[in-house]
Image (cartoon, helix red, strand yellow):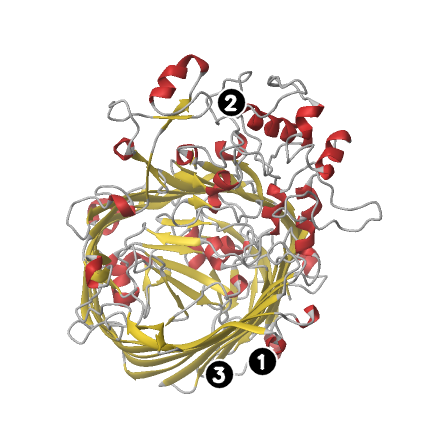
Amino acid sequence: MLGLTALALIGQPAFSAVPSSPPKQTNLAQERAVSGKVLSSDDNNALPGVTVTVKGTSRGTTTDANGTYRINVPNDQAVLVFSSVGFLSQEVAVGNRSSVNITIQTDTRSLNEVVVVGYGTQKKSQTTGAISSITPKQITEQPVTNIGQAMQGRVAGVDVAQSGSRPGSVPTIRIRGRRSFNAGNDPLYVVDGIPLAREYEDINPNDVASMEILKDATATAIYGARGANGVVLVTTKRGNANGKTSITYDNYVGVTDALDKVHLFSGSEFAEFVREAYRTTNNYKDVNGNPVPTGVADAYADSKVAVLGGDPNVAAGLAANRNTDWQSMLLKQGIQQNHTIGVQGGSEKTQFYISAGYFQDKGIMPGLDFTRYSLRANIDHQINKVLRVGLSSYMMYSLRNGETLNPYNFTLQQNPLGRPYDDNGNLIFSPTNDALLTNPLAEVIPGAQIEERKKYRIFNSVYAEVNIIDGLKYRVNFGPDFTINRFGRFIGAQTNARKFGDPQASNAAAFNFDYTLENVVTYNKKYGDHNFGITALQSIQRDNTEFNNINVQGVPAETQSFYNVGNASSVLGVGSGLVQWTINSYMGRVNYDYKDKYLLTATIRRDGSSRFGENTKYGNFPGVALGWNISNEDFLKGSSWVDLLKLRVSRGSVGNQGVAPYQTQGLLGRTVYAFGSTAAFGYRPETIGNADLRWETSTTTNVGVDFSLWRGRVAGSIELYNTRTTDLLLSDLLPTSIGFNAVTKNIGETQNKGIEASISTVNVNTKSGFKWTSDIVFTKNTEAIISLFNGPIDDVGNKRFIGKPLTAFFDYKKAGIWQTSEADLAKSYQSAVGQIKVQDTNNDGKITADDRVFLGSDIPTWSGGITNRFSFKGFDLNFFIYARVGQMILSGFHRDNNQLAGRYQQIKVDYWTPNNPTNEFPRPNSSQEFPVYNGAILYYDGTFVKVRNINFGYTFPASITSKLRLQSLRLFASIQQPFIFSSYRSKYNGVDPETSASDGVVSNGVVPATRVTTFGLNVKF
């Protein structure tokens, strides 16, 4: 399998390690050169990149693009070792030959590849859980800001939804669906063995050597209460032991453009929309008092409409046939660039990897950008035969501007008949008489709106490993994590929010210190055909967060921004706090296999959390998995078409502690009262504590099949799973007469079940060097609520329904628009021609709450991705397509930008008029800001297909790179997200449907989808 094959490179030296004792001295006069060519037994083609070493020494080289090599050997007794990923290593004695040609055998089974499984590694042939892998190639072959983006469409069972095009935005990631309402659904991220307590996106993707995603309960059970929503294991790059130091430089630089603008009305179209709104209410009449028919403009009638001729600024725009494109005035071309320098090397005793990274993303709007600086040092040192120590240190500083700012939204509302500048070129703050519609360009004047987040982070992983006896090891891991967040906000006087009022500023800071301390004992031993592995763990993780904030008004000089809040005329609010939590854990795991045929993994973890009460702090989370390597049975060993066939069955439970600290206690809230004639503060009970709160528990049954056919031509895995989550942390409603609305309890149950498949194929592999491979990923997940606080009874108020997903769209169903011929029927439903017609579900002749129906959910019917890779004589081309099919979205974007009264600019929609009796959108109406049953027109098919990335590159042959004194050189060009296919965009003028949040709502605060075009190089010295 392609992804698994690449994993064999991780942590492996490029050349043989220097032996523990130095080789015998050789006679330099005997040293001579040996050359030759390496061919593949599969198709007899030349093999580039094969490692050729002199056994017992640190000497080594690799074959060039033509499969040839040249290496110096010390004497006639030298032995050459040929090795390459996907092929069996082979040793050849040189003798007195000066030329050694060889054909090496393909390793079709790839069973010796090693994957990270948490607290250790396993051969792929011995894994029993549902584990998927991401290779460095998959991470870096497209421009990504964070490692989360690299998982989209590359891992079956992992749903990754972009949260928009804002620089620094982080996608929403769900592994096998959502399980919980309140306890969180984010996976756990483990970096170099240390679980993260907070953001994963700070990691530089170029530092990542591999990512493994643990999906079923037996795979995640080793992380117990932290692994309820899946686990992402991130392993960063390490040094090597070949005695050589290599330097790599990876970079790309490119431009970011808006993929499209929102289609709004032109100036004349907007004027006609407004006229129609006033015709509907019989307020668009000529000088004689006669109604002006649809499609006819009347100057007198315009003058009586406040937002048209009644506004001198708009009247001038009408006369000039003005069409101000506010969007284009705000949008600009952005810049994205990434640079990483890495130094990798080492000896038998000490290995190191050091890198420095710089990433910058300047968005397509002023004031929106993200910059990250990073520095990593990974060092491993073998002190003696018994003791090995190591350090992984990562330092990061990031600066993000405009995290929530949305000046773009003002361009969607502003009247296109207004003008931005006066005759002298000065910005007009209010282009029309409408006080709420200020000039969008005023929001992006430097210093007018500032929203700045600075983050400083130092994340470390320190270990010491002791070889006690053969097979028995003790390891201590310590992972301190320091994070400082500083958030500054300033709103100047000449902005829409202040409208020449006193400027406002706020300053907030959070100081986080998290540490993990683990003691791990492992024992691995083979007794004949029996192979045992035992892991025991004791772990403690503690988090400490301090925060403070202050909000002020009346900053005397706007140049002070949020830096000198002490000079402000008034303090609007201050706050500070401390939050602490601790998890204490114990874990045991046993791995067993017999002849690499029959496999067993049994795990038990016990977690205790300070977030729960004395009687319920600890929870036990077991897991067991069985595997059968069918292809190792005698009846398949001689098969010419089955390389690998493995069946896996597992069942296990994991917990979720995702409740805020201190919820088991009754909390107090401050209140105010009159103490005589003096104002005073007091405290009152604010919540009801529940000392019996305990873990949510998810139990998963998983059946999986791994396969490789026809010498690796087709390889992959298929998984079937069913997860039940019980003891949900939900609010149980209480009668308000007791003073409280609800209390948090362990009640309710949800279910997730599905199928997922990953398939890799070698479609074409010719002797001429042309190769075409494909990676295909398919995911189908079904969510369902099984019970709630009243058992298997719907909670209509919170739109939670038994048998439906956690997010369910329950509303009136649009049946069209009332037409002229239906005037009487519309009237019987208290409606009118041109308004929204909704379905009378129970046919009782009236529209009531009982007519609402389940419309859909944000859960897709299926999602998937396909990556095609082509290569020919140094050239390579790959493109990645991602699809999410069958989900529904609620378009808050249409809700806020499709109002009837004609006060604000509109999305260009097909609205009803007597001349255009459409069934799409209702007739404008100056007396209605929003249509009756407005919700019925806000639900859309969220299906989309994206060409996520196209990458074309060229790797220079060794004949050129050697002259440049380089090990390798590749130039490439990439275009990210050049196409989005979606009816929500093409038919209804919506934005990127992928920007829906976890509740399926596309908000009005989105930034237009972007296309990123980059050029870069990968060079190794």
For disc 1, the neighbor class at 10 Å (few under 14, some 14 to 19, many from 20) is few
Q: Residue at x 24, y 62 (%)?
A: 740
Q: Closer to the N terminus: mark 2 or mark 3?
A: 3
Tell me which amino acid carries mark 1: Asn
Rendered view: 582 above or below 434: below
Q: Residues within 10 Å of mark 2 (few under 14, many from 20)?
A: many
Q: Residue at x 16, y 50 (%)?
A: 790
Residue 993 locus on image (x, y percent): 48, 41
801 or 232, nearer to the observer: 801
- Are the residues at dot 2 and dot 1 in contact (C-beta closer than 8 Å)? no
- Which residue does the numbered mark 1 point to in the structure image? 27
Residue 22 is marked as 3
User: Residue 688: image x %, image y %?
Assistant: 23, 68
Q: Amino acid at mark 3?
A: Pro
Out of 530 and 297, give the one closest to the viewer: 297
- As measured in the structure, the alpha-carbon distance from the residue carrying label 2 to the one carrying label 1 is 95 Å
Residue 912: assigned label: 2
Residue in the image at 31% along x and 51% along y: 178
Task: Name the N-terminal-most of marks 1 and 3.
Answer: 3
Q: How many marks?
A: 3
Q: From the image, state whether disc 1 or disc 3 is nearer to you.
A: 3
Q: Inspect the image, locate mark 2, and give the three-letter code of the amino acid beneath it.
A: Trp
Residue at the spot 24% in from the left edge and 26% down from the top edge: 842
Residue 693: mark in rendering: none
Asked if residue 242 is positioned above or below residue 229 in the image, the reply reads below
